[in-house]
Image (cartoon, rainbow, N blue to C red):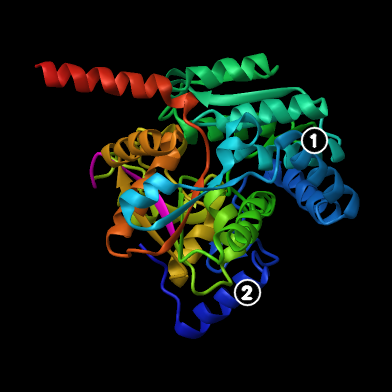
Amino acid sequence: MKAVLDADEASELLRASIAGELPDERGRFGPFGGRYIPETLVPAFELLERGIREYLPSDEFQQEYRTQLRDWVGRPTALTFAARLSERWGTKVWLKREDLAHTGAHKINNAIGQALLARKLGARRVIAETGAGQHGVASAAACARVGLPCRVYMGVVDMQRQAPNVDRMHRLGAEVFPVESGDKTLRAAIDEALREWVSDPAGIYYLLGSAVGAHPYPYLVRELQSVIGTEARQQMQDLAGGLPDVAFACVGGGSNAIGLFYPLLGDSDIELIGVEAGGTGDGLGQNAATLATGTPGVLQGCYSIILQDEHGNIQETHSISAGLDYSGVGPEHALLQALGRVSYVTASDDEALEALQELCETEGILTALETAHAYAAAKRWSRDNPGKRILIGNSGRGDKDMPTLARYAARTNANAAA
């Protein structure tokens, strides 16, 4: 459900978005965003906001952050031309390879930036949440890098389907706290992390993993992830001979997508398409397609588009991909949908699995199940747009998804035998 904006308001908000003037002083992206939090957390959020204003733009912080991105994360990540996939689809497909970043996904860009900020703010320890496990791994690695203890909250459902990443977090020195409340996935993990933060807001830094939550997190995560789109824009000009006609990214909370899209907002000729998890159907509880089927409301400190019933009860979601299995979405995505600058579509579990397999067989890249949703939508788009230049944000690698892929293959084989 899109927010209703009049033409003049929409035009001004789009201009402000492109100019980098959002969020406003209230933490709002137009009608979305803001800060809806317990009184006990107000000092912690105010400290974080002051720290962002003081440290984030400073030359000292930026130099340290860029050095870590270059020497430890491995940036810039490659832009890869997918020749065989392009031949199949009839378009020119380029991949922004966040799977090649240290720890295997875009999450590390945000994690190391926030870990450096936590140290600047004098935090004694860091907490984080994770769904697919990639943010948990990135947080554990970043905290080890800067010398801060780390606890990661993770739903037990996600722990089971992302067991390799649980082991990686342990090996990187983090404590992984199993969450058995609620839906036992990402939303429940965020709830538990917030409860822990309330217990010691002065000593704990909450390293939030996506462009969601109360202000200033959507802004902070966007700023740290925008390195993706900034690099990709220049690489497309240098290697592909021009900007893309369209850019695709998967959308759960939305950090990799806003990181790719934000530096491209001002390029009006580039179509931007976010891809949500269509799951197994259109009904509540069958998918995690927040922008496609949700309504405005407040979730975990932020006014955005969320999945809720007619009584305002947050609905459980489903996706084969743990990283997209979330009942909300970042407020900037909600605005960009309302403005019509970004289109949001869905891809089903089966489409994502088929796209993942096709990429493996044609390009030798095992992508994450999250990212596979973007490939599925890009393939559909290609059918009506032959010869066009496509940029896909390859947000992470799929090693973590091998247990899920193995279980799916076993079920498929069993069904075929029956």
Is 128 in front, or is 17? 17
Of helix, strand and loop, which one carries label 1? Answer: loop
Task: Indicate the quadrant containing the C terminus: top left, top right, bottom left or bottom right.
Answer: top left
Task: Give the residue number, with chain letter if any, for mark 2.
Answer: 16
Residue contact between numbered discs 1 and 2, judged by CB atoms under 8 Å: no
Residue count near mark 2 (Cα–Cα under 10 Å), binned few <14, some 14–19, many ≥20? some
Residue at (42%, 22%) from the top-left corner?
A: 402
- The image position of residue 220, as x and y in percent, is 69, 51
Q: Amino acid at mark 2?
A: Ala
277 magenta-colored: yes
Which residue occupies 44% across, 33% down? 364
Q: Is residue 20 left or right of residue 132?
A: right
Secondary structure under the numbered disc 2 in the rendered image = helix
Disc 1 designates what residue?
A: 202
| Viewer-nearest residue: 244 or 282 | 244
The quadrant the N terminus occupies is bottom left
How crowded pointer 1 is (Cα within 10 Å; few <14, some 14-19, many 20+) is rated as some
Q: Is residue 85 above or below residue 366?
A: below
The amino acid beneath tag 1 is Ala
**Residue extending farthest right:** 60
By secondary structure, the bulk of the magenta-drawn segment is best described as: strand
Q: Which residues are magenta?
A: 273-282
